[in-house]
Image (spheres, helix red, strand yellow):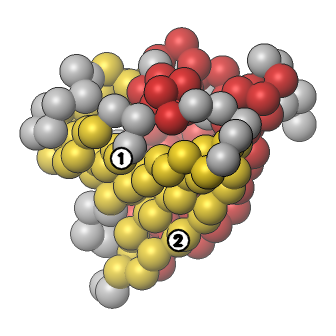
Amino acid sequence: MTAGEFVYTTYIKATPDRLWGALTGPAFTSLYWGVSFETDWQPGSAMTWQEEGATTADPEQVVLEAEPGRRLSYTWHTFTPEWAKSVGVDEETRRALMAEPRSTVAFAIEPAGGTVRLTVVHRAGEALLGMSRHGWPHVLSGLKTLLETGEPLPAG
């Protein structure tokens, strides 16, 4: 399976440090993403994902880069049966995801006047990219809305 990438750039009225906290703080990520991370955000450290009542831990889920206020990168989670059940992914799709190489996501944070430019690059196989093309715009819109208004996007 070949890998491709999904790239998304948005501008958020926030500081780089505040955006960093929103990308790494479990209480914050759970508000706009429904996911929280357990890690110390040091390169090489393991990450445990909490999503929809499922806990996903794997030795290959690690922080790749962590420069507060500038750059964050990590490997994507493992597609366990528990995760699939919790988020409504069928077994055929889960197996297609598992057949792909582990993906990575990188967040570049750059000051841009009174805003911050956030660029997200998710490198993944085609099955995950298909899902990411729908998921990332919603997640990042929720992040932007929460940072700029203090309120999460309405459920919908």
Q: Which mark is residue 6?
A: 2
The residue most toward the front is 113
Which quadrant would residue 146 be assigned to in this image?
top right
Q: Is residue 113 left or right of residue 52?
A: right
Q: Label 2 is placed on what type of residue?
A: Phe
Question: In the picture shown, does residue 117 fall above or below 4?
Answer: above
Crowding around mark 2 (Cα neighbors within 10 Å: few <14, some 14 to 19, many 20+) is some
Please give the residue where the numbered disc 1 appears in the rendered image.
71
Provide residue 104's location: percent of width, then percent of height: 32, 59
Q: Is residue 21 left or right of residue 38?
A: right
Provide residue 151's location: percent of width, then percent of height: 82, 19
The residue most toward the top is 27
Q: Label 1 is placed on what type of residue?
A: Arg
The residue located at (61%, 51%) in the rendering is 112
Which of the two marks, 2 or 1, is nearer to us in this view?
1
Provide residue 50's location: percent of width, then percent of height: 43, 24
Callout 2 touching callout 1 (CB < 8 Å): no
Which quadrant would residue 77 be assigned to in this image?
top left
Question: In the picture shown, does residue 35 fall above or below 120?
Answer: above
Report helix, strand or loop for mark 2: strand
Provide residue 82's location: percent of width, then percent of height: 42, 34
Of residue 103 and residue 51, the one placed in the foreground of this image is 103
Report helix, strand or loop for mark 1: strand
Q: Is residue 156 visible?
A: yes
Quadrant for the C terminus in the image: top right
The residue most toward the bottom is 2
Q: Earlier in the sequence, mark 2 or mark 1?
A: 2
Of residue 110 and residue 138, the one placed in the foreground of this image is 110
